[in-house]
Amino acid sequence: MPAVIISPDCLRGGGKPASRTPPGQTLTAKWPVLHYGGVPSIKPESWSLRIFGLVEREITLDWKAFDALPKVDVRCDIHCVTHWSRLDNLFTGVATRTLLDLARPLPAAKFVIEHARSEPNDDFTTNLPLDAFAAEDCLLATHHDGRPLTAEHGAPVRGIVPRLYFWKGAKWITGIELVDRDRPGFWEVNGYHMLGDPWREERFGW
């Protein structure tokens, strides 16, 4: 059985829903589908993940190699920049720390650029600090609440960064680039916040 990791935000205020809901958010039991452009159909056998940039060892994992890595379960809350939150999600996948340990980031690496496939963008990106990406509750997920992710929600693999707004975990992720300077991704270029802390309502502007 995978180790179960509880995201710290689930424990706020003794775990009461009101204490776990950031300002400006409304709770929902549904999982809304939001993204830019169309939904790519990516079969696991054609998917791969590249970890590159400021690393000791650049690696590319195909689905078989990725799926063979140790798995974790992460229980976390989702906070979308569009003002909805969904509590108590269970994501299963590979911890970001496991992937970073394989590539071994260089000391100069301070930020991560997530690369993803999207339609019409072949290289959709989003950015975040390396320490945020490497938090214990971050993972590249293949399952949600015990079921494989659907294409609309990022199958076969999507990033999960529970302590930031949900767009900071890229759907259809294909690359993890380690860099020394922060670099805005797609939504950040279009006005979204460079960090995206939901508890500070860092939705727009930088």
Image: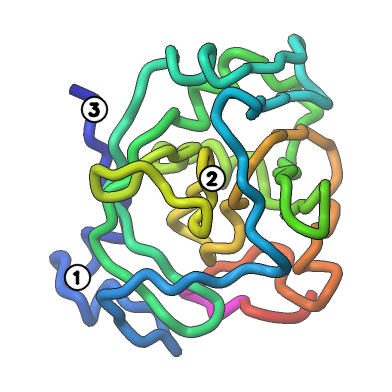
Q: Nearer the viewer, residue 37 or 190?
A: 37
Q: Which residues are magenta?
A: 198-202
- Vertical position of residue 31 compared to residue 65: above or below: below
Binning the other alpha carbons within 10 Å of mark 3 as few (below 14), some (14 to 19) or many (20 upward) gives few
Q: Give residue 13's mark.
A: 1
Query: How far, Cα to Cα, is label 3 from label 2?
Result: 19 Å
Query: How far, Cα to Cα, is label 2 from label 1?
Result: 29 Å
- Amino acid type for the residue under numbered disc 2: Arg
Q: Position of residue 56 (x, y in %)?
A: 76, 11
Q: Earlier in the sequence, mark 3 or mark 2?
A: 3
Q: Position of residue 71 (x, y in %)?
A: 35, 24
Q: Earlier in the sequence, mark 3 or mark 1?
A: 3
Instruction: Report whether 127 appears left or right of 18.
Output: right
Assess whether residue 111 is covered by the magenta stretch.
no
Instruction: Report whether 140 appears left or right of 54.
Output: left
Cβ atoms at labels 3 and 1 below 8 Å apart: no
At mark 1, the secondary structure is: helix
Q: Which secondary structure is most common in the magenta stretch? A: helix
Q: Give residue 3's mark.
A: 3
- Amino acid type for the residue under numbered disc 1: Gly
- Amino acid type for the residue under numbered disc 3: Ala
